[in-house]
Every structure is written in C-alpha cells, then in structure tokens.
Image (cartoon, helix red, strand yellow):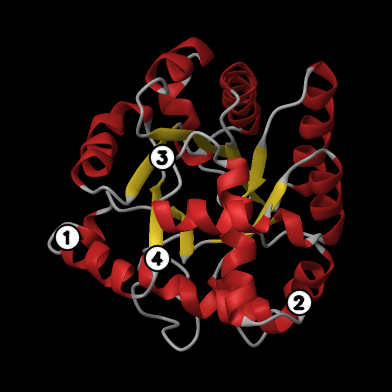
Amino acid sequence: MLVDSHCHLDFPDFAEERAAIVARAKAAGIGRMVTISTRVKRFQQILEIAETFDEVFCSVGTHPHNAAEELDVTAADLVRLSAHPKVVAIGEAGLDYFYDKAPRDTQAQGFRAHITAARETGLPLVIHSRDADDDMAAILEDETGKGAFPFILHCFSSGRRLAEIGVALGGYVSISGILTFKNSAELRAIAADVPHDRLLVETDAPYLAPVPFRGKRNEPAYVAHTAKVLAETIGVSEAQIADLTTNNFFRLFAKMPRPPEQTAWAEQSA
C-alpha cells in the first residue's frame, strides 16, 4: 500500500472524472489520499470530496498565494474546522517567494496562524516553501521555540539546509515527482540523506507528474512512480519503500484511521 499525502482533487482538472481518478488510484495500490486545502473559503468543496470517498481525507488552510485574501481566517477558525473527522491536517500554508502573489509579511502572518492551529490541534501542518529557505528556517526555529508542532515540508525542492533544519525540528520531508526528473540530481542527493523515518511521497496532483508522465496531468495513481525512484535513491526495494512511507504517513497523520490491512502490518512490525 502507498499513500498520496498531497493532491488537489477539488481542482477543475479533475471535475469531470473524480470518481475514475480515485478508482485508478485504488487499483494502483494507493490506499489513502489527502486532498489539500488552498482556500479556507472553499473548504466545504474539499470536505464534500473527502466525505464522498472512503479513501480520501483532507486538510484545512490557506496557500501563501491566497494569504492576502484570507487574513481574516484565524487560528481559532482553523481549529474549529479541523474538528471534522475527515480533516487530518492543517494547511497548506507557508512562504512562496518565487511567485510573490501575496506580500511577504502577509504570507508570514498567515503562516504563523496556521502554526498556532497545528500546535493546538496536534494535526500536522502541510508547509509550502519555495525560494524562501532562510525565512522559512527562521520562522520554523522561532515557532518551535514557542512549542513544538508536527509538520511536513511538502513537495520538497529546497536546499539541503532547510531539509536538515526541518528534520532537526521534528519535521518530515515529502517527495514529489520532481525526484524523477533528469535534472534533479541535487534533490536525489538530499533525499538520500533524509532519515528513513521522515520520508513521505506525494503527487501534488494535478501538477508535477513523474516520469514517464512528465508534462501531462498528474493524478494520485502516479505516486507509485515517485516511490519507485525514491526506493532506488535510498537503496531499498519498492515493497520496503511502500511500507516505510506508509508507516511514516500514519505516524504523522495520526488522526487518520489505518485500513485493516495496514493495521495488521503495523502490529507485526512493532
């Protein structure tokens, strides 16, 4: 069993065939999918998708691109909305200095509100970080000093220092299809050095389809291709990477119930 820890099933790319996409993922051995919120004001749409499919869960949060639109969303709002049984994470939130679609101080303000919600709920914070390594590291260190909180550096494509700081602070690193690209040697080198108990896999679908689907629309079933390359990168078998990343996922996303077959595996491995 594999888990797609980050996808966007509410995006228009999937509107016409959402059920078929979930079915293809199940057929490919993807036992759980987390569809990630980018706007709290569209949270009900995300929740409806999660409630429709047993295998799909969701998060609640505001992407840094949308931070200026949702500064009125408080940590208390996030905590309240996260009480739904299908909500297993906070975010995605963070810093994006590549596109700079929201003022940087606004992104940071929203990000810290999400950190507060993650700390209060114990739910993992899904972190988006692009071209913002120094500020991201500084905020993570500052906020962890106020009290630890679970988090994941999603779709990791940053530098080695941020990966090391994230792991040192108790965070996890999620690997996307970028790992499979020919020009991603540096990312593969970083992934090889991440402790095995801190690795996850994701698609970020509909974006960043792995080889051999690069350039096409991504979907959760394709996480198996990223997992295969990650297995090669860290020197384990495909079966081992499935067990490893899935067990890591359920440790971090502790609110999500394990399916019966995964529960049995976890008990045998304990």
Q: Amino acid at mark 4?
A: Ile
Q: Is residue 192 above or below residue 88?
A: below
Which residue position is annotated with label 3?
Answer: 38
Measured in 3D between alpha carbons, the distance from the residue under mark 3 to the one under mark 4, in whole angstroms, is: 23 Å
**Front position among marks 3 and 1:** 1
Residue type at numbered disc 2 = Ile
Residue for badge 1: 19
- Kind of element beneath mark 3: loop
Give the foreground label among 3 and 4: 4
Relative to 101, 27 lies left or right: left
Q: CA distance from mark 1 to mark 2?
A: 34 Å
Identify the residue at image location x=26%, y=62%. Answer: 22
Question: Mark 1 Cα within 10 Å, few/some/many (few <14, many 20+)?
Answer: some
Q: Name the residue beneath numbered marker 4.
A: 30
Q: Name the residue beneath numbered marker 2.
A: 234
In space, the residues marked 4 and 2 are separated at their CA atoms by 21 Å
Residue drawn at x 48%, y 39% is 63
Three-letter amino acid code at the position of disc 1: Ala
